[in-house]
Image (tube, grey):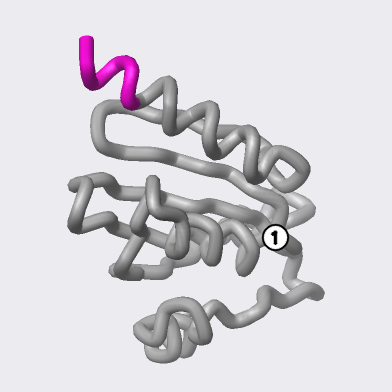
Amino acid sequence: MLQSSIVKYINSLIINNCTKNLISINVRMNKVLIYIKHTAIRNVLYFLSRSIIFKASSLLDVWVVDYPERENRFEVSYLLVSIKYDFRYIIKTSVSEYKSLYSVSNIFPSANWLEREV
């Protein structure tokens, strides 16, 4: 029961703070999957990293999946972790081959290497 109330609380916080950039959100157990607009990637990652509630302290990985049939063919995913609260956040966004994403290395220094590999 406690886990269920925590999940609902997290869901409402993300919706209230990121609503204009949010496409979808799915919260289960200790994992949160957030799909956002590509223009908001830095704002949302900054919010999750600085929020007292979320404490997403580390960026563990960044990966891309290519869907050639889509208009925004590249789906970019960021895996964040809150060590303090034992939560994982997967932030996803899609971008076309003609657009780029802003770097998040000023928020998470580990992104410097990970973004180059993507």
Q: Is residue 62 left or right of residue 45?
A: left
Residue 23 to residue 117: above or below: above
Between residue 97 and residue 91, name the one nearer to us.
91
Between residue 77 and residue 71, name the one nearer to us.
77
Which residue is at a point 41% across and 69% down the rendered structure image?
A: 62
Number of numbered discs visible in the structure rendering? 1
| Quadrant that contains the N terminus | top left
Which residue is at a point 62% across and 68% down the rendered structure image?
A: 42
- Residue 67 in the image, given as x and y percentages of width and height: 60, 54
Which residue is at a point 64% across and 63% down the rendered structure image?
A: 43
- Residue 102 in the image, given as x and y percentages of width and height: 66, 78
Whether residue 78 appears in magenta in the rendering, the answer is no
SS class of the residue under badge 1? helix
Residue at the extreme top of the image, as rendered:
1
Query: Splitting the image into 4 quarters, where does residue 16 fall?
Result: top right
* Classed neighbour count for the residue bearing mark 1: other residues with Cα under 10 Å, few (<14), some (14–19), many (≥20): some
Q: Which residues are magenta?
A: 1-6
Q: Taken as a whole, is the magenta stretch helix, strand or loop?
A: helix
Q: Is residue 6 left or right of residue 103?
A: left
Residue at the extreme front of the image, as rendered:
52
Query: Splitting the image into 4 quarters, where does residue 98 fall?
Result: bottom right
Q: Is residue 69 left or right of residue 81?
A: right
Query: Splitting the image into 4 quarters, where does residue 57 fall?
Result: bottom left
Residue receiving disc 1? 40
- Residue 90 in the image, given as x and y percentages of width and height: 41, 50
Residue 12 to residue 54: above or below: above
Which residue is at a point 42% across and 21% down the rendered structure image?
A: 8
Whether residue 2 appears in magenta in the rendering, the answer is yes
Q: Amino acid at mark 1?
A: Ala
